Amino acid sequence: MNIILLGPPGAGKGTQAQRLVDRHGMRQLSTGDMLRAAVKAETPVGLQAKAVMERGELVSDEIVSALIDAELTALGASAGVIFDGYPRTVAQAESLDAILASHDRSLDYVVELDVDEDALVERITGRFSCATCGKGYHDKFEQPAQPGTCDKCGGHDFKRRPDDNEETVRTRMAEYRAKTAPILPFYEARGIVRRIDGMADIDAVTASLESIVAGAPV
């Protein structure tokens, strides 16, 4: 199974991708993570990417394609793949088709976690966590049992991410829509786009994803 998993920041895409990795042995391929790893390992592609980034330029589609090709070669044919953050343009989508074909693979589904923007803003801006152990809480959905005291470690210091504010969240949503809009019609024409209610309970979202992986209608 080879899928593209789409969803704006805060939609739960990372959580769901990790569950697919844990349950099915799939590999999550994030272009950002692959770039950082290649640069750190000083692979030929990584050195090429490093030189581009040091010039303040964007990494080309050719470099990203080379990274994906190398990852698929190392992975072998047995494990499924979740593409995260790629493709973002029709040209990249066409390139991905060619790469997959060269590895005797094909894209099965493009799965989008559909979210309500206002509800997502509430979900993200209400998040906070224990500064000691990292346990997550929410202003509305999950407060500590004893106010001011972490349920897990008993700590009393809490923190919020500075970018968990409404302006930033809405900007991220606009960027996500702008980046995904070009590729969705490309895949919709092939009948492989599936949408899941990303605002549902986490386990319900997982169940819907499992149905897609199993090839059942959602």
Image (cartoon, grey):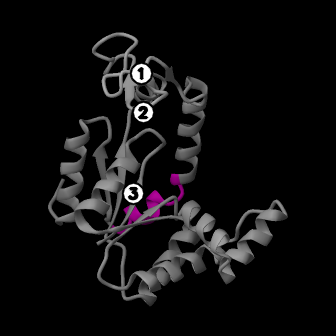
| Residue 50 found in image quarter | bottom right
Mark 1 Cα-neighbour bin, 10 Å: few <14, some 14–19, many ≥20: some
Q: Which residue is mark 3?
A: 5
First of labels 2, 3 by sequence position: 3
Inspect the magenta stretch and tell me whether residue 184 lies in it: yes
Residues under numbered marks 1 and 2 in contact, where contact means CB atoms less than 8 Å apart: yes
Q: Which residues are magenta?
A: 180-190
Please tell me whether residue 129 is drawn above or below residue 108 in the rendered image: above
Instruction: Residue lying at the far top in this picture: please name it.
Output: 147
Mark 3 Cα-neighbour bin, 10 Å: few <14, some 14–19, many ≥20: many
Q: Calculate the distance from the C-alpha at mark 3 to the C-alpha at mark 1.
A: 36 Å
Q: Could you say whether the residue bearing mark 3 is in a helix, strand or loop?
A: strand
Mark 2 Cα-neighbour bin, 10 Å: few <14, some 14–19, many ≥20: some
Q: Which residue is mark 1?
A: 155
Q: Calculate the distance from the C-alpha at mark 2 to the C-alpha at mark 3.
A: 30 Å
Q: Amino acid at mark 2?
A: Cys
For image coordinates 30% across by 11% down, the residue present is 146
First of labels 3, 1 by sequence position: 3
For image coordinates 50% across by 60% down, the residue present is 183
Q: Which residue is mark 2?
A: 133
